[in-house]
Image (tube, helix red, strand yellow):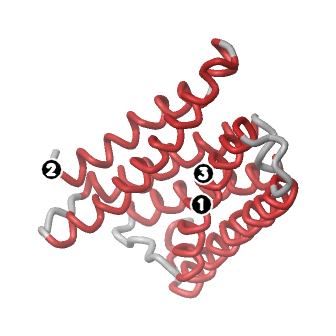
Amino acid sequence: MNIPNKLTVSRLIMAPMFFIAFHLGVWFGEDLQSLSSILTLLLWALTELTDLLDGQIARRRNLVTDLGKVMDPFADTFSRLTYFVCLSGAGVMPLWTFILIMWREFSILFVRMLMMGKGKPVAANLWGKSKAVLYAISGALGILYIALDNWLSDAPFMEGARIGLYVVFVLAALSSVMSFLTYIKAIIRDGSLSTMTR
């Protein structure tokens, strides 16, 4: 358990903490809604920061491990699906975008496991990187929107913000699907799919 792997584990711990913090106002009354918004923004920031740092530290200090290769994408999926399910349940994130993202994430985890069993890592691509950025942005904007809706619900810009947020979630879902299709295309071109199914 080196430093990068500890940072990865921290994301697994923060995901349920995020879920609890997100629902404080629902479970214990609206008086805690402001605290809920602050805590969820803080936990989102820490989650994304540890995701950024664990990879950088692992590469710079040559601390890349087999455990980290498996645990890092799992922690990413675990944490991001947690705040997406919260946003979807709150009616902020369109349900169909969440479903597409969830299907993609479980599918790519399955493909990664198959590829690792063959000793062939799944390389990142442009769509995958775009997806990761859009996941982070849409999550942050969704959480921020809920906070502003609690604090400034009558502000005239909130309706426009809602439309903009919808567009960001749609882009996140589309980039999610495109990145998965790009992975599959690369695997088929490489011939790995046929060897896995024999």
Locate residue 52 relative to residue 101 in the image: left or right.
left
Kindly identify the residue that appears in the image at 76 percent across and 49 percent down: 99
Q: Provide the residue designation for mark 3.
A: 106
The residues bearing labels 2 and 1 have C-alpha atoms spaced at a distance of: 27 Å
Q: Nearer the viewer, mark 3 or mark 2?
A: 2
The answer to whether marks 1 and 3 mark residues whose Cβ atoms lie closer than 8 Å is no
- Could you say where residue 147 lies in the image, as x and y percent from the top left? 66, 41
Q: In this rendering, is residue 87 above or below 66?
A: above
Q: Provide the residue designation for mark 1.
A: 135
Q: Mark 2 or mark 1: name the one nearer the start of the chain.
A: 2
Q: Mark 1 or mark 3: name the one nearer the start of the chain.
A: 3
Identity, as a three-letter code, of the amino acid under mark 1: Tyr
Q: Provide the residue designation for mark 2.
A: 2
Locate residue 3 relative to residue 76 in the image: left or right.
left
- Could you say where residue 111 lies in the image, as x and y percent from the top left? 53, 61
Image quadrant holding the N terminus, namely top left
